[in-house]
């Protein structure tokens, strides 16, 4: 049984295969020649947290490939509290062909994966966001052709999005550098996983954003306070104050630099309006790529 819980579980070849299928889906979508590869399939989307991009791109993508989607808010199905994860997984596996989950705790996904007899896609957990990571890599590939040897500077929190992107970059030979305040970098568990399963060369971490972007082809940022961390918001606003992606920081990067953001953006915090709406920002191309990347993931799991 294959699942899509973390990019670290994929081989380089699988990652390349998903990216080329995603690109094919994008071209087919533009030409109106998409395959009906999910005809007769039902996909359940179980979300404990809010979403625009993940939910809508999955639901639309499933419809475009001829499948059916069911949206189930986590509190309605009582995920993890109305019955055990094991009972939940064994039951729902009888009704649907694929599960997409957005959860607070990554352990919920691992628990379900143990008992489900259908594949599970991680639609974001506190640990990782692999669907986002795949769409990000597709975007980098579109921007630069061959992504190998490029440099991505992630300015912000060493969070779920940063971990997935760092792993994806490591697997494809893209340099990844994290600029964050002291104490908000990657943790030891991630370091150990990365060094064991991706590369011995762990991404560089700095506390100075200007230093990080100096040779960057891509500057990436995400919110400073992720879903579930709301109680830390005031503290985080203070700690991340010098880590805003603004015109002053862009001026320190090479002229060709592009800016990515997984969205939703907290304009005026991690990124300014000027950068978000400026010519370097490709966040909406990146958001569009979620649709195509996820079609490739679903086909990989189901066909
Ligand atoms: N980037 C992303 O996952 O967006 P949503 O939270 O809106 O799904
Ligand atoms: N790091 C953010 C990403 C949202 C798509 C969060 O987890 O809230």
Image: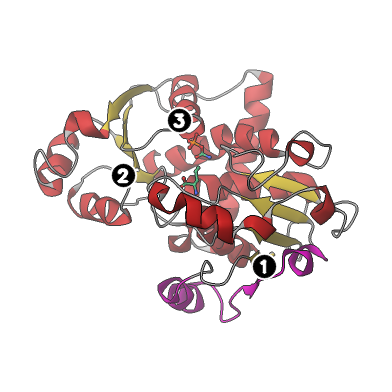
Q: Secondary structure at mark 2?
A: loop
| Alpha carbons under labels 3 and 2: distance apart | 15 Å
Q: Earlier in the sequence, mark 3 or mark 2?
A: 3
Query: Could you tell me residue 8's position as x and y percent?
Result: 47, 63
Residue with the mark numbered 2: 119
Q: Which residues are magenta?
A: 187-215
**Residue 165 percent coordinates (x, y):** 57, 57
How many C-alpha atoms fall within 10 Å of the one at disc 2: few (<14), some, or many (≥20)? many
- Quadrant location, the C terminus: top left
Q: Is residue 196 above or below residue 162?
A: below
Residue to which mark 1 is pinned? 177
Q: Between label 1 and label 3, give the one nearer the viewer.
A: 1
Q: What residue is at 25 percent from the left and 34 percent from the top?
A: 74
Residue 247 visible in the current orientation: yes
Q: Residue furthest bottom?
A: 200
Q: In the image, which disc is placed on residue 58? A: 3
Report x, y in % for residue 26. Answer: 64, 31
Cβ of mark 1 under 8 A from ligand 2 = no
Report crowding for label 3: few under 14, some 14 to 19, many 20 or more residues within 10 A (C-alpha). Answer: many
Q: Nearer the viewer, mark 3 or mark 2?
A: 3
Which corner quadrant of the image does residue 30 belong to? top right
**Cα gap from disc 1 to disc 3, whole angstroms:** 30 Å
In front: label 1 or label 2: 1
- Secondary element under disc 3, as helix, strand or loop, is helix
* Front-lying residue, 267 or 92: 267
């Amino acid at each position: 049984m294959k699942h899509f819980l973390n990019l670290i579980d994929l081989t380089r070849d699988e990652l390349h295969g998903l990216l080329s299928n995603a690109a094919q889906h994008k071209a087919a979508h533009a030409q109106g020649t998409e395959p009906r590869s999910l005809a007769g399939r039902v996909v359940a989307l179980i979300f404990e947290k809010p979403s625009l991009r993940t939910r809508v791109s999955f639901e639309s993508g499933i419809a475009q490939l001829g499948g059916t989607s069911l949206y189930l808010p986590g509190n309605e199905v009582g995920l993890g509290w109305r019955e055990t994860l094991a009972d939940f997984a064994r039951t729902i596996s009888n009704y649907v062909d694929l599960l997409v989950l957005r959860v607070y705790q990554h352990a919920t996904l691992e628990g379900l994966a143990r008992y489900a007899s259908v594949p599970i896609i991680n639609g974001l957990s506190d640990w990782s966001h692999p669907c986002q990571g795949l769409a990000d890599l597709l975007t980098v590939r579109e921007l630069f052709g061959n992504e190998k040897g490029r440099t991505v500077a992630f300015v912000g929190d060493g969070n779920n999005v940063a971990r997935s992107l760092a792993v994806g970059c490591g697997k494809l030979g893209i340099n990844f550098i994290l600029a964050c305040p002291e104490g908000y970098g990657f943790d030891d568990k991630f370091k150990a996983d990365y060094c064991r399963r991706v590369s011995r060369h762990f991404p560089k971490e700095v506390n100075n954003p200007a230093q990080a972007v100096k040779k960057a082809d891509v500057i990436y940022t995400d919110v400073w306070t992720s879903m579930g961390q709301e109680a830390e918001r005031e503290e985080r606003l203070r700690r991340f104050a010098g880590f805003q992606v603004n015109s002053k920081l862009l001026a320190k990067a090479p002229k060709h630099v592009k800016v990515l953001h997984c969205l939703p953006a907290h304009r005026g915090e991690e990124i300014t309006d000027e950068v978000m709406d400026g010519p370097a920002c490709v966040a909406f191309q990146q958001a569009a790529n979620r649709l195509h990347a996820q079609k490739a993931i679903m086909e990989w799991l189901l066909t």
